[in-house]
């Protein structure tokens, strides 16, 4: 993030532009001079990369090199940022896909700008005269209406089809699963049978993929059995879908068994099969077998992809093995596979977890040197690195650069910066991040508000925590626990009990943190009866069990009243409670 003056001068048209790594070029992406060089300090000196002019991205408004140099020169003098229309030519501004201007026209009706040309033609033909739409166009109409989210009109269009075939039903299935309505998609499968249309393997695979994304393995298995019972022959895509469902749950044994059934049916595993097997072992934490899958790919003549190596890198990152992740990256390059942004982001996260910020900066330099554009994840990881290092000013500067180079940060980016201010107890700057988020058009989520509430809870300010709590539409258990912690730190047991009653009225199931916070508050005040009542209620709860922390707080409640015999009795009860447990909790100090 080194700030350095940019040197500009005239150069021939066929010159080569020098760009600096990693941040200076990103700042100047929208208005680059014809030839500029900004230094970036490294251990070896200044690092620059040469890019031919013909491969350079165009500037704002399609400016010529000479006008870009003039704009940059004026910008360095403090005359402001150039406007998009200031240049030799004006670029046509298209509405952003997914924005209200792109989705709806002047009359409030959805427009067709995000759709492919053939789907736009099919929709226009359907709206002009549905009787002249053929079967191929009906499929495109259903897909197009599903993409723009008009499911009611999609059903209306489907009812106008004289004899729907499995292509039309599969389009319905795809649209409903894409919208997250899997149960409705199941009814579409039943409608196929009622109208005499036999579902094919694609119909079942669409449902299986929807359940696999939700990690609902039982429902995916049920659909797979229904497919076999209906006489549909599973293909490679079907088997890969089920193997991926097992892989996301970390069930490598079931994934391998299904792979053997796949080979027994004379279906050769492809790259997606091996990638799913690699993911299964990585989620299981078995990196040795995950690396053996890579060897099996080589023996089978299947070339690994960037996804294969990225999955292996994620497994090393989960174990905290940065050296192993570096070896995977080197093996990727040796195999002739070019790393993508996900690969570098994964390696950067590994260095950030180990608090090796120089290594994270080095990975960012390698990423830019490879010609890759940093993504939102890249900048968010960099902000977390600066936040852990205590350099909040640099973290804010990274976020400011993101906005300047037209990379829109997401809610996790702002939450990472907010957490940095909360950890330092600077609530004014944390509140300013929330305002910054709203100006940027990013909608806060529960994590954002909970982070802000945690700062006020640490200060023991329940009034401000209540103000943030009221901004949340649907509070969850973590939100209630944070608010309860605010009252507990303020020494207000009645306020904490009121939060607990609000939690029960909202039908939010309490957790161990909820009960332990209450018992800690009772222990400070020496309220043994309330602590015992909380322990009994905790034992009856379905989602919480007493831990050593719970018994320790109960013993503190007895000791604060001077009742050593009662504390000794709690210790005997704790030993009896964990006597027959197969997996006792970690031992903690009782006193």
Image: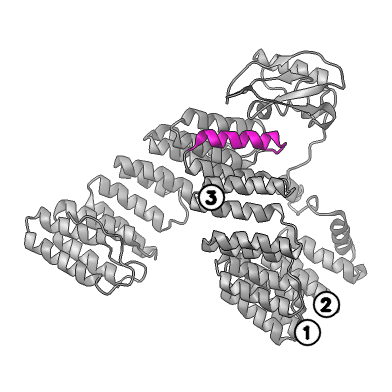
Q: Spatial distance from mark 1 to mark 2, Cα to Cα?
A: 9 Å
Q: Residue at x 40, y 49 (%)?
A: 469
Q: Residue at x 38, y 65 (%)?
A: 509
Q: Of tags 2 and 3, which is closer to the observer?
A: 3
Q: What residue is pinned by disc 3? A: 317
Q: Which mark is residue 167?
A: none
Q: Residue at x 57, y 73 (%)?
A: 253
Circle 2 crowding by C-alpha within 10 Å: few under 14, some 14–19, many from 20: some
Between residue 18 and residue 376, name the one nearer to us: 18
Q: What residue is pinned by disc 1? A: 195
Q: Residue 78, how many percent across, how many down? A: 64, 15
Q: What residue is pinned by disc 2? A: 164
Between residue 93 and residue 348, name the one nearer to us: 348
State yes or no: residue 355 in magenta: no
Residue segment shown in magenta:
356-373
Circle 3 crowding by C-alpha within 10 Å: few under 14, some 14–19, many from 20: many
């Amino acid at each position: 993030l080194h700030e350095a003056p940019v040197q500009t001068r005239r150069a021939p048209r066929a010159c080569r532009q020098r760009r600096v790594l990693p941040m200076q070029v990103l700042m100047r992406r929208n208005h680059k001079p014809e030839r500029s060089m900004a230094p970036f300090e490294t251990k070896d000196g200044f690092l620059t990369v040469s890019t031919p002019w013909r491969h350079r991205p165009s500037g704002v408004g399609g400016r010529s090199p000479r006008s870009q140099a003039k704009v940059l020169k004026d910008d360095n003098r403090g005359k402001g940022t150039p406007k998009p229309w200031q240049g030799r030519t004006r670029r046509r501004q298209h509405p952003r896909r997914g924005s209200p201007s792109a989705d709806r026209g002047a009359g409030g009706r959805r427009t067709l700008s995000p759709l492919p040309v053939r789907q736009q033609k099919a929709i226009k033909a359907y709206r002009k005269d549905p009787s002249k739409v053929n079967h191929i166009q009906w499929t495109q109409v259903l897909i197009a209406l599903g993409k723009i989210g008009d499911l009611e009109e999609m059903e209306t269009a489907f009812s106008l089809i004289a004899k729907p075939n499995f292509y039309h039903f599969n389009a319905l299935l795809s649209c409903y699963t894409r919208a997250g309505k899997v149960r409705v998609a199941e009814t579409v499968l039943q409608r196929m049978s009622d109208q005499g249309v036999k579902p094919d393997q694609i119909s079942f695979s669409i449902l299986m993929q929807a359940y696999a994304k939700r990690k609902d393995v039982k429902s995916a298995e049920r659909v797979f059995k229904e497919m076999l019972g209906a006489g549909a022959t599973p293909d490679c895509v079907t088997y890969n879908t089920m193997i991926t469902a097992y892989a996301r749950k970390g069930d490598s044994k079931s994934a391998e068994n299904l792979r053997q059934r796949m080979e027994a049916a004379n279906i050769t595993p492809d790259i997606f099969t091996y990638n799913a097997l690699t993911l299964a072992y990585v989620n299981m934490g078995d990196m040795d077998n995950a690396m053996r899958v890579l060897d099996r790919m080589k023996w089978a003549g299947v070339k690994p992809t960037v996804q294969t190596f990225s999955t292996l890198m994620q497994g090393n990152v989960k174990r905290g093995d940065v050296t192993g992740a570096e070896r995977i990256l080197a093996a990727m390059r040796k195999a002739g596979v070019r790393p993508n942004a996900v690969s570098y982001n994964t390696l950067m996260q590994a260095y950030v977890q180990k608090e090796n910020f120089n290594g994270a900066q080095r990975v960012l330099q390698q990423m830019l040197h490879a010609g890759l554009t940093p993504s939102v994840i890249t900048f968010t990881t960099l902000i977390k690195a600066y936040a852990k290092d205590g350099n909040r000013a640099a973290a804010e500067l990274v976020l400011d650069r993101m906005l300047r180079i037209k990379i829109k940060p997401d809610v996790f980016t702002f939450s990472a910066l907010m957490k940095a201010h909360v950890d330092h107890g600077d609530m004014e700057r944390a509140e300013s991040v929330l305002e910054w988020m709203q100006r940027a058009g990013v909608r806060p989520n529960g994590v954002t508000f909970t982070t802000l509430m945690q700062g006020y809870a640490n200060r023991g300010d329940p009034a401000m925590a209540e103000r943030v709590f009221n901004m949340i539409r649907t509070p969850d258990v973590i939100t209630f626990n944070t608010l309860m912690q605010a009252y507990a730190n303020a020494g207000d047991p009645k306020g904490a009990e009121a939060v607990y009653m609000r939690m029960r009225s909202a039908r939010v199931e309490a957790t161990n943190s909820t009960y332990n916070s209450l018992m800690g508050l009772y222990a400070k005040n020496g309220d043994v009866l309330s602590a015992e009542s909380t322990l009994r209620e905790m034992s009856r709860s379905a989602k919480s069990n007493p831990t050593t922390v719970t018994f320790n707080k109960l013993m503190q409640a007895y000791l604060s009243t001077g009742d050593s015999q009662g504390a000794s009795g709690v210790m005997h009860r704790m030993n009896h409670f964990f006597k027959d447990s197969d997996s006792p909790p970690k031992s903690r100090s009782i006193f």
